[in-house]
Amino acid sequence: MKRTIVSLAMGTLFLGCGVPKSQLDAKALEAENLRRQYGDESEKAKALDSKVAQLSADLETAQKERAKSEEALAASESRRQELQKKVAELSALNESLAQSKEKLEKARAELEKKSEQYESLAQSLKDEIKTGKIELSELKGRMVVKMKDKILFSSGSVKINPEGQAALVKVAEALKDVPGKIVRVEGHTDDVPTDSKGPFPSNWELSTTRALAVVKLLQEKGVPAERLSAVGYGEFHPMASNRTPQGKSQNRRIEIVLAPEDQAPGAKTNSASR
């Protein structure tokens, strides 16, 4: 309606001015075309605005996703570095453990390494060791010849029986040729009390007297007296529990300890002799 009025008004204006109708029609057509072009351009502008808005929203979303990805990447890199650090720490620990294990193996091998003196003594006493009369051990240069008391003594007695004498003669023969060692005879008992009114009021006296008996026999068979000593420990250094007969039997024993000469009573150390 509005367009019609405008056209009539323009026609009246041009008619009033004496403009031909054909020109008026042409102008009207031109005006209509311009109006349509304007409408088309407006629609295009609206479409472009909508597209720009969508692209802006997409860009914002993409930027947010990129920020999240960068955060995730940074976190992943931090985690990777942390894991690398852990791996390095574990590798260092593993290397340290390997070195410690190697040192322990060497130390154990050194401890278990038998000396020539041990091998010689074991060879000399091989028959007694084989029959179980004697047990031989060595640790850090300290050799121990262990003999169960039943091989040496009858129950409650301090007199060495014939079987024990024969075994000790073999021990004495072997010990005479072991240089640089003191020979300490140690007596041990189980925890069964002795008769307090008898010749041995306690296991102290019994263990010490038995050790002295062994020392005297070793001396008689050629072991130098200055290398010999005796000590009694009673029941106070058990090898096993005294609650069983087997344990008591293991605890009743004589141990002949071969130790370095510098452990002899009154021996001077290097520092004291300077």
Image (spheres, grey):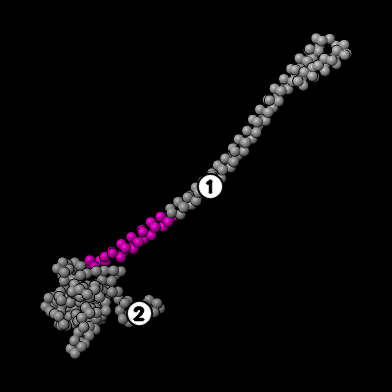
Q: Earlier in the sequence, mark 1 or mark 2?
A: 1
Q: Is residue 193 magenta?
A: no
On the picture, is 122 further left or further right than 108?
A: left
Please state which of the two labelled residues, at mark 1 or mark 2, is closer to the viewer.
1
Determine whether 21 is above or below 272 in the image: above
Q: Is residue 103 magenta?
A: yes
Residue with the most extreme bottom position: 197
Residue plotted at (21% across, 78% down): 190
Q: Position of residue 69 (x, y in %)?
A: 55, 42
The numbered disc on residue 268 is 2
On the picture, is 249 further left or further right than 265?
A: left
Viewer-proximal residue among 202 and 137 = 202
Label 1 residue SS: helix
Residue plotted at (46% across, 52% down): 86
Residue with the most extreme right position: 17
Report, in whole angstroms, how far the alpha carbon at label 1 lies from the one at label 2. Answer: 69 Å
Residue at image mark 1: 75
Q: Position of residue 152 (x, y in %)?
A: 15, 77
Q: What segment carries the magenta color?
A: 92-120
In what quadrant of the picture does the C terminus appear? bottom left
Q: Are marks 1 and 2 in contact (CB under 8 Å)?
A: no
Determine whether 92 is above or below 156 in the image: above
Please tell me how crowded label 1 is: few (under 14), some (14-19), or many (20+) other residues with Cα within 10 Å.
few
Please tell me how crowded label 2 is: few (under 14), some (14-19), or many (20+) other residues with Cα within 10 Å.
few
Viewer-proximal residue among 70 and 96 = 70
Residue 14: quadrant of the picture? top right
Label 2 residue SS: loop
Residue 26: quadrant of the picture? top right
In what quadrant of the picture does the N terminus appear? top right
Viewer-proximal residue among 215 and 130 = 130
Q: Amino acid at mark 2?
A: Lys
